[in-house]
């Protein structure tokens, strides 16, 4: 049996992500897609369009239930949930039946406070999994 190579455990969420390829010249069109799972290392995204392997992406990731603004004034439950903004890189592209694509996206950069909040959320979610 093969050895597990993943550094991070995946948490299935099935939420939305908006991504836009970062490139010189004309701006790339933003795309909306659903991601199947998230980890401290990245996302698994189902996409209707192919994105080149190695492409850098601006990500806006909806993470249901996370608390990115815990340090703000007032109760966290009163704070609007905002998406995780990050930069990622496409590390895997697989064409699926029906012309859809599955993209493996590795997180490269995010605001340190958001990164810490995401890690806390993922740790809690993993502890709740059977």
Image (tube, rainbow, N blue to C red):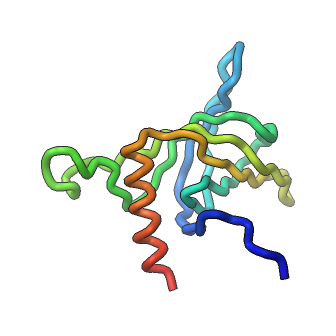
Task: Give the residue drawn at x 58%, y 34%.
Answer: 58
Q: Position of residue 21 (x, y in %)?
A: 67, 31
Q: Quadrant of residue 109?
A: top right
Q: Position of residue 45 (x, y in %)?
A: 66, 53
Q: Nearer the viewer, residue 55 or 27?
A: 55
Task: Give the residue drawn at x 61%, y 56%.
Answer: 35
45 up-or-down from 85: above or below:
below
56 up-or-down from 12: above or below:
above
Task: Give the residue drawn at x 62%, y 41%.
Answer: 88
Q: Position of residue 91 (x, y in %)?
A: 75, 47
130 up-or-down from 44: above or below:
below
Q: Position of residue 34 (x, y in %)?
A: 60, 54
Residue extending furthest left?
74
Residue extending furthest top?
25
Task: Give the residue drawn at x 81%, y 49%.
Answer: 93
Q: Quadrant of residue 83?
A: top left
Q: Nearer the viewer, residue 121 or 98?
A: 121
Q: Nearer the viewer, residue 2 or 100?
A: 2
């Amino acid at each position: 049996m093969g050895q597990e190579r993943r550094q991070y455990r995946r948490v299935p969420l099935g939420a939305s992500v908006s991504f836009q390829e970062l490139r010189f010249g004309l701006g790339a069109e933003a795309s909306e897609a659903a991601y199947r799972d998230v980890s401290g290392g990245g996302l698994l995204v189902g996409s209707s369009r192919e994105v080149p392997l190695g492409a850098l992406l601006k990500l806006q990731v909806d993470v249901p239930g996370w608390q990115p603004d815990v340090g703000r004034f007032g109760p966290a439950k009163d704070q609007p949930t905002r998406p995780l903004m990050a930069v990622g890189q496409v590390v895997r592209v697989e064409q699926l039946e029906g012309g859809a694509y599955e993209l493996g996206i590795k997180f490269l950069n995010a605001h340190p406070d958001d990164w810490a909040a995401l890690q806390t959320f993922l740790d809690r979610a993993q502890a709740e999994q059977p």
